[in-house]
Image: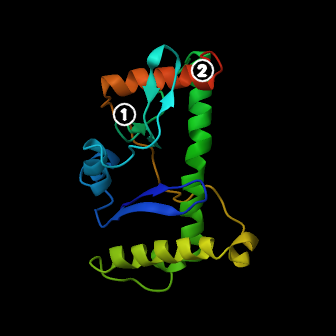
Amino acid sequence: MILQVIVDPDMRFRDIVTGYPGKMDDASVLQKSKIFDLSEKGERLNGKRLKLPEGTEIQEYIVGDSGFPLLPWLITPYQGLDLPDTKTEFNKRHFATKLVAQRALARLKDVWRMIHGVMWRPDKNRLPRVILACCILHNIMIDMEDDALDELTLTNQHDSGYRPEFCDMADTNASLSRDKLALYLSGRLHI
């Protein structure tokens, strides 16, 4: 079963989509989600914009992996080998940011082993509610700054069977924005 999440810098789950079969691709799950509809309509991720030289503005965005489409509000890494320095630097920073979500998922699975099916096997109709409850409890533990979480040894790998997906869909304006953002992050474009 797929769990698609948006995670903040403190590893809190801010948006959760679950219940779809594991064989669905990331882009399809995203397009069926509420965050997709709201973001496409401009009702989410519509906060402060980063102003770059020459009047270019980068809107508020989330970071997604290569299985998602490149959209104005969803920035994905560059694909390919032998990328220019600016794109390589962008991908390094993108990967570092994405690690926060991977750590949050690893922590979720380490603390709430029941979602692994270790303790029991809920039916597929109840599992999404169990996962949602575990995510909510995860957030509560972070809010309470539970010392038990600090003592856990966590890995960044939350799913050993995961194979990366690649999505070829890219919005033209998002591609231009990502290029400008890459130049900015590499220090080659100054505000």
In percent of the image, x 37 and y 28: which residue is there?
A: 174
Which residue does the image show at 54% across and 77% down from the upper left? 113
Q: Is residue 174 left or right of residue 48?
A: left
Looking at this view, name the residue that lies furthest to the bottom.
120
Quarter of the figure with residue 45? top left
Q: CA distance from mark 2 to mark 1?
A: 20 Å
In this view, the residue in front, 4 or 190, is: 190
Residue at 28 percent of width and 62 percent of height: 20
Q: Which residue is mark 2?
A: 191
Q: Amino acid at mark 1?
A: Pro
Residue 159's x, y, as percent?
Answer: 51, 59
Secondary structure state at the residue bearing disc 1: loop
Q: Is residue 79 visible?
A: no
- Residue indicated by mark 1: 72
Regarding residue 156, the answer to whether it shows in the image is yes
- Going by the numbered disc 2, the residue's amino acid type is Ile
Residue occupying the point 59% across, 19% down: 86
